[in-house]
Amino acid sequence: MGSLFRSEPMCLAQLFLQSGTAYECLSALGEKGLVQFRDLNQNVSSFQRKFVGEVKRCEELERILAYLAQEIHRADIPLPEGETSPPAPPLKQVLEMQEQLQKLEVELREVTGNKEKLRRNLLELIEYTHMLRVTKTFVHRSVEFEPSYEEFPSLDSDSLLDYSSMQRLGAKLGFVSGLIHQGKVEALERMLWRVCKGYTIVTYAELDEALEDPETGEVIKWYVFLISFWGEQIGHKVKKICDCYHCHVYPYPSTAEERREIQEGLSTRIQDLYTVLHKTEDYLRQVLSKAAESVYSRAVQVKKMKAIYHMLNMCSLDVTNKCLIAEVWCPEADLPGLRCALEDGSRESGASVTSFMNTIPTKETPPTLIRTNKFTEGFQNIVDAYGVGCYREVNPALFSIITFPFLFAVMFGDLGHGFVMFLFALLLVVNENHPRMSQPQEILGMFFNGRYILLLMGLFSVYTGLIYNDCFSKSLNLFGSGWNVSAMYSASHPPAERGRRVLWNDSVVRHSHVLQLDPSVPGVFQGPYPLGIDPIWNLATNRLTFLNSFKMKMAVILGIIHMTFGVVLGIFNHVHFRKKFNIYLVTVPELLFLLCMFGYLIFMIIYKWLVYSADTSRAAPSILIEFINMFLFPSAPTSGLYAGQEHVQRLLLAVTALAVPVLFLGKPLFLLWLHNGRSCFGVSRSGYTLVRKDSEEEVSLMGSQDIEGGSTVLEDGCREVTSEEFNFGEILMTQVIHSIEYCLGCISNTASYLRLWALSLAHAQLSDVLWAMLMRVGLRVDKTYGVLLLLPVMALFAVLTIFILLLMEGLSAFLHAIRLHWVEFQNKFYVGAGTKFVPFSFRRLSWKFSDNGA
Amino acid sequence: MLGSAELSFNVDHGYLEGLVRGCKAGLLTQQDYLNLVQCETLEDLKVHLQTTDYGNFLADQTNPLTVSKIDMEMRKKLCGEFEYFRNHSLEPLSTFFTYMTCGYMIDNVVLLLSGALQKKSVRDLLGRCHPLGRFSEMEAVNIAETPSDLFHAVLVETPLAPFFQDCMSENTLDELNIEVLRNKLYKSYLEAFHNFCKDHGDVTAEVMCPILEFEADRRAFIITLNSFGTELSRDAREALYPTCGRLGPEGLRLLAQAEDFEQMKRVADHYEVYKPLLEAVGDGSAGKSLEDVFYEQEVKMNVLAFSRQFHCGVFYAYTKLREQEMRNVVWIAECISQRHRTKINSYIPIL
C-alpha cells in the first residue's frame, strides 16, 4: 500500500563516470532502467554537444540498416524479430560492425544496381517486341492510306510547294515509333498537330498488356504509336516532342524482312537476359537472407547505442576532463541497484578507476514515481489522465480501486449485465498471457488495458444489481417476498379491524383496476426483504416512485460521504508537507461547512427512515421543506422531525456561517503573521516552526556547498526556491478563489452526485423497455409459432442488450464515474501538478523499423 | 458580399487554412537562425535542421553534403506541401493556386529558352527549373523559334496562354528579347492575378492586392535599375512596367524618364511606402542591396497576411515565406561551405 498511497521518495544523485567507462555504465543503467537523467547542457545547441559525432555515426548506421531492411522487405524475405534484445555493442565492436555494414551496403547497392540495369534492359526489349508486333498491323493500314497523303497537303495551298520540293529532293516518309503513357497520348497528338501543322500522321493502339514504368516502378497501361512524317526538319521536331512526353522511341524497321530479323534477335536476347537476371536475383537473395539474420539485432544494438550517446550528451564535463558528471533522479529504494549497475559497467570495461555516485540534497521538486502492477495500472492511468500527482502527494488511485467500480456499479446496477461484463473481463484476464493479446488492436487494446477495472466493475454491478433486485430488468425472488397479499382480505381479520381499514373482498378485487396493499394491516408486511429491494415491487405500479425516492437519497448520501472522504484525505497531505496550520485553518472549516449543511441532510434522511413507520408515515414531514426552512426561518412554526429541531438547526447554521470567514481569511492572515515574526501570541507553536525554518536553511546551505563543483544551474535553482517572495495579496487571492470554489462547489457537487440516481434510473428504464418491446412480445405468441419466433427475438434481444445496454450505457456510466472522481472527489485534495518519472530504459525504445525517425 | 467569407470560407477551405497555419508555425525562428549561424560545417547544419520542422529530410542523402542538395531537398519539401494543398483545394482556391504557379512557370519557360539559346542540354536545365512551375509541355519549349511559335505550339493549353497576348511579336528569340518577353509575361500575369484577387473580393482582396501591388512596383523598380546602360528605349521600358501597382500611371511615367539611381530615388520620394526603402539602400559593402530591402518589406507584408483569417492570401504568404527561408538557409550554407563568415548574418529574418 505504501507505494501506491504516495509516490516513491526520490533523491538527486551525481554520477561520476570515468570517461573510459561511461558508455558501459550507461549501457548497464539502460538495461535496468533505474534513473532519469537531467539535461545539464540545456543551453548548448544539439550540434555543439560532446558526443554529436557518435550520434551521427549511429544515424549513419541506422540509415544503412533501414536500407537493408527495405531491400529485404522488397525481396519478400521474412525479417526475423528476435525476442531477446542484445545489449548495446561494446565500443570495440562498433567499428567492426560499421565496416561490415558499410561493406554490405556497397555490395548490395552494386548488385541491386546491376539488377535494375538488367531489368531495364529487359523491359526495353520487351517493349520493343511489343511495338514491333503492334505496328505490324499499322503498316497495312498505312499502305491503304498512302494515296490520301498525296492529296492531303494540296488542301493547303502554300504547303504544296513543300510537298513538291520534297518529292523532288527524294524525301520519303520517315517513321518514329515507340511507346507512350496512356494519359499522354492525346496531348502528344495535339502537340504534333500544332507544331507540324498536319504534316504527320499518328496512329496508335493500346497495348493489351500492362508494363512497368522504369522511372516510377508502377505498372501502367501503354500505347504504341507510329508517327509518319515527311522531311528532316519535321523529323527533328517530332523527336523533340517525343522526348518532351517521355516516349520510349525505338527504331522502326523499314521492311518486313528486317522486322522479322529484329524480332528473332530480340527473342534470343530476351532469353539470355532472363537467365542472367535469374542468376543475379539468386545471388541477391543469398546476400539478403544472410543479412536478414542479423539486421534486427543490429538495429536494436544501434538504437541502444544512440540512446546512450543521447544521454551522455546530457552530462557535463569534469574540470579535469577525466570524467563525466551526470545528474540523475533515482528512487531511494533503487540506490543499491544504481551502485551495482555502475560497478558492473566499470568492471566490464576493465577500467582501473570505478565510476561512483553520491547523493546531493536539493530543493527542487523531484519527479513522481508510483510503482504499479498490472492490477493497479489501469486505475493509476485514470488518475494520471487528470494530472500526474505532485511529489509525495496522496494518490487517489489507491481509493479509486474501490470507489470507481462502486460508483460505476451504482449507475449500472443490473445483476445480469454486470455478470456478462464480469465474464468478458474474466476472459481477458485469464487469457492475458496469450500472445495475441500483447499487441491488440486499438479498441480491443483499450478493453484489454482496462481489464481489471472491467472485472471489478462487473463484480460491483452484480452486487448493486442484487441490491436493486434487477436482472435484465426482472426481479429475482430469492428469499420470498415480505408482503402477503392474502392478509388484505377482510375474511382473515377480526371484525373490529374491518371497520378501521380499507380491506378487500371479492367484489373489490373483481371490480377495481388497481389494488393497494396497506402495510399497516397486520400480516400484510412481514418484515423487510433480507437483501435489497423486495421483488414484489416489480409488480407495483408505483415502483418507479418508490425506487426514485430510494435512489435519490442514496445518491446524496454516497456523494456526501465521498466528498467528505476527499476533504479528510487533504489532512494527510497537510501533515506530510508539514503544514499543520492548514488543517485548522482550511480543512476543519471545510469539513464543518460540508457536514453542518449536507451532513445534517443525511442525518435527516436516515432519521426519517428509522423513526417513521407505516402507521405514522402520514405525519412525516418533507425533508426538502425542512431543509429549506433551515435557511429561511419561517415565522410559523412547523411540525418538525424532532423536538428542539429549530435550535439545533440554528446552531448548525451559525457554525456554517462562522466557517466561511475562517476559510476565507484564516490562512492568509496566519501566513502574514508568520511572516511578520509572529509578534503577538502562541509560544509553543512558534517554537516548533522556528526549528523547522532553521533546519530548512541548513539543508539549503549544505546543498549549495556540496554542488559547488558541479553545476551552476542547480545552485541558481536552489537560491530561487529559498528566496521566494512573500506576497500577501497573492496568497489572499488564491485562498479567496479556493474558498469560493469550495463553498459553491459543495452545493453544485452534491447536486452533481444526483447523476448516480439519474443514470441508474435511465439504465433500469432502458432495460425495462427492451424487455417489454421484445421479449414480452416474443413470449406472448402462442406455442406453435412461438418456438420459431423466439429464436430471432432472443438473438435480437442479446444483440441489443450487448450494444445498447452494455456498451453504450456502460460507456456513459464509465464516463460519469470518471467525472465524479476527477471533479467532485479529486478537487477536494488532489493538486496533480507533478511530472512523471521517466527513467532511461532501453525497454522504452521502440524496436520497429518503420519509425526510425527522430 | 460583406462578411460572407466568415460564413462560407471554412466550408471549403477551412481544413487547408488550418494546415497552412500549422505549417507557418514550423518556420525557423530567430533562435534557430542564431544556432544555424554558429554551425561550423554543413553536417552541423544538417544536425540542427533535424531538430526543426524539417526533420530528417536530409537523412537519405549520402555524403558529402552540398549546398545544392540541401536546396533541392528543401524545394522538394515545399513542393510536396504545395501539391498537397493544391490537390485538396476547391474553387476558387484552386484557381488561386494556379495563378501562384504561373509566376514560376514563366521563370521556367524563360530559363529553358535562354538555355536552348546557349545550347545547354535540356536535362541539365530541367534540374534547375523550379518544381512549383513544372508542366508537361515544358520540355518542348525549345522547339519554338519566335514568340508566336512558342504560343501556338507549346503554351496554348497551359495557364500561361492568356498572358501572351501582348508579346506576339515576330521577333526571333535572342537574349534581350527573352528578357523582354519575361517581363511582358510577368506584367500581364501580375495584372491578371491582381484582377482575380480584386474580383474575388472580401478579405482575400484586402490582403492580396497590397502584396501584388508591392510586387508590381518592385518589378518596376528592378526593371528600371537593370535597364540603365542598355539599349532599351524609354518607351519600351515603360511598356514593361506592370500597371497594377501603387506607382500608378504617374509614377511609372516618371520612372520611365529616370536615367540613374538618384533619379529613381527621387521618384520613390513621392511615395510614402517606398521612400524609406530606397533610403535604406546603401552603396558598396556597408549597406543593404535594393533586393534585400525589398525582400525585407515583402516578408513584413507576408507575415501580416497571417493576422487576417478566411482568405487565400495565407497560402501565397506561406509559400513566399518558405521561399525566403530557403534563400536564407542556402545563404548561410553557402557562407559556411565557402568559409566566408563575415557576411553570414545578412540573411533576412522572418519575424
Image: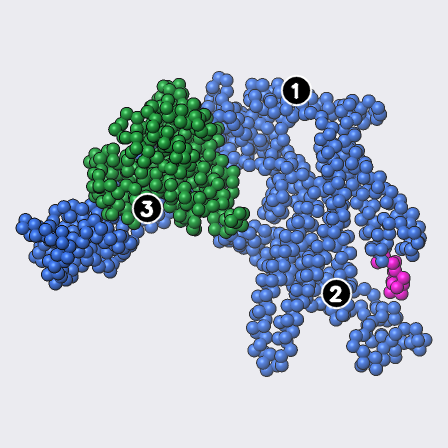
Chain colours: A blue, B green
Q: Which residues are magenta?
A: A608-621
Percent position of residue B140, x then y: 24, 44
Disc 2 on helix, strand or loop? helix
Identify which amino acid the numbered label 3 is placed on. Answer: Pro
Q: Check the residue under mark 3 and report the chain it is in.
A: B
Residue A824 lies left or right of residue B139; in this view the side is right
Name the residue rendered at 69%, 44% in the picture.
Answer: A826
Name the residue rendered at 65%, 69% in the picture.
Answer: A771
Residue A619 lies in the magenta stretch: yes
Report the disc number at residue B162: 3
Q: Check the residue under mark 2 and report the chain it is in.
A: A
Rounded to the nearest angstrom, the CA distance separating label 2 from label 3 is 78 Å
Disc 1 on helix, strand or loop? helix
The residue beneath circle 2 is A544
Q: Which image quarter holds the C terminus of chain A?
A: top left
Q: Nearer the viewer, residue A823 or B79?
A: B79
Bin the neighbour count of mark 2 within 10 Å (Cα to Cα): few under 14, some 14-19, many 20 and up. some
Disc 3 on helix, strand or loop? helix
Report the disc number at residue B118: none
Q: Which numbered disc, 1 or 2, marks the residue that appears first in the sequence? A: 2
Identify which amino acid the numbered label 1 is placed on. Answer: Leu
Percent position of residue A787, x then y: 58, 78
